[in-house]
């Protein structure tokens, strides 16, 4: 995590500040699947960085301070907005992303805890970057 290194924070210190297990930060940095939005939010708060910065693959991005918002709401609203703008049904998006149609419905209705890898699959299917679902 370039941002953690730039701030001079160790994995253990970040895990402690975010209330996570010591090995969790290492797993996230090696792109382990299954990282939940809640975990991303906790890391963002601990680093005082907006979650969009942590998901942005561009190392040149200017770090923005943490802005409080419900990430599940952002994802639900933006997923539906991007899907509708492309004229896709939930079924279309599920086929493109490899998710079950019920999963797309649950994300849009905030009935599921979204994982970062799921965001990536949906974003790729929509032709956007995952961080754009958190704005």
Image (cartoon, rainbow, N blue to C red):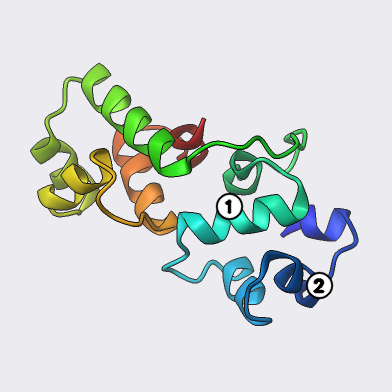
Tag 2's secondary structure?
A: helix
Question: Percent x, y for residue 24?
Answer: 60, 76
Q: Name the quadrant containing residue 12.
A: bottom right
Residue identified by numbered label 2: 13
Question: Percent x, y for residue 70?
Answer: 48, 40
Name the residue at 26% across, 28% down. Answer: 80
Q: Name the quadrant containing residue 68.
A: top right
Question: Percent x, y for residue 6?
Answer: 87, 54
Name the residue at 74% across, 56% down. Answer: 46
Q: Are marks 2 and 1 in contact (CB under 8 Å)?
A: no
Say left or right for 15 vs 57. right
Question: Percent x, y for residue 58?
Answer: 66, 40
Residue identified by numbered label 1: 41
| Residue situated in front as seen by the camera: 48 or 56 | 48
Name the residue at 66% across, 58% down. Answer: 43
Name the residue at 44% across, 55% down. Answer: 116
Label 2 Cα crowd, 10 Å radius (few <14 / some 14-19 / many 20+)? some
Say left or right for 81 vs 64. left
| Residue situated in front as seen by the camera: 7 or 73 | 73
Tag 1's secondary structure?
A: helix
Say left or right for 94 vs 10. left
Q: CA distance from mark 2 to mark 1?
A: 16 Å
Label 1 Cα crowd, 10 Å radius (few <14 / some 14-19 / many 20+)? many
| Image quarter of the N terminus | bottom right
Residue 63's disc is none
Q: Is residue 122 above or below residue 16?
A: above
Give the total number of marks visible in the rendering: 2
| Residue situated in front as seen by the camera: 73 or 61 | 73
| Residue situated in front as seen by the camera: 124 or 11 | 11
Q: Reading the chain from its start, which is encountered first: label 2 or label 1?
A: 2
């Amino acid at each position: 995590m370039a941002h953690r290194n730039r701030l001079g924070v160790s994995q253990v210190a970040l895990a402690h500040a975010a209330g996570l297990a010591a090995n969790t930060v290492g797993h996230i940095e090696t792109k382990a699947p299954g990282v939940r939005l809640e975990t991303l939010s906790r890391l963002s708060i601990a680093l005082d960085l907006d979650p969009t910065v942590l998901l942005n693959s561009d190392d040149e991005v200017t770090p923005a301070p943490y802005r409080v918002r419900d990430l599940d709401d952002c994802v639900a609203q933006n997923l539906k907005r991007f899907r509708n703008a492309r004229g896709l049904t939930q079924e279309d998006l599920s086929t493109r992303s490899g998710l079950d149609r019920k999963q797309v419905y649950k994300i849009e209705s905030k009935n599921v805890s979204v994982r970062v890898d799921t965001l990536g699959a949906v974003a790729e299917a929509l032709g956007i970057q995952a961080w754009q679902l958190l704005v």
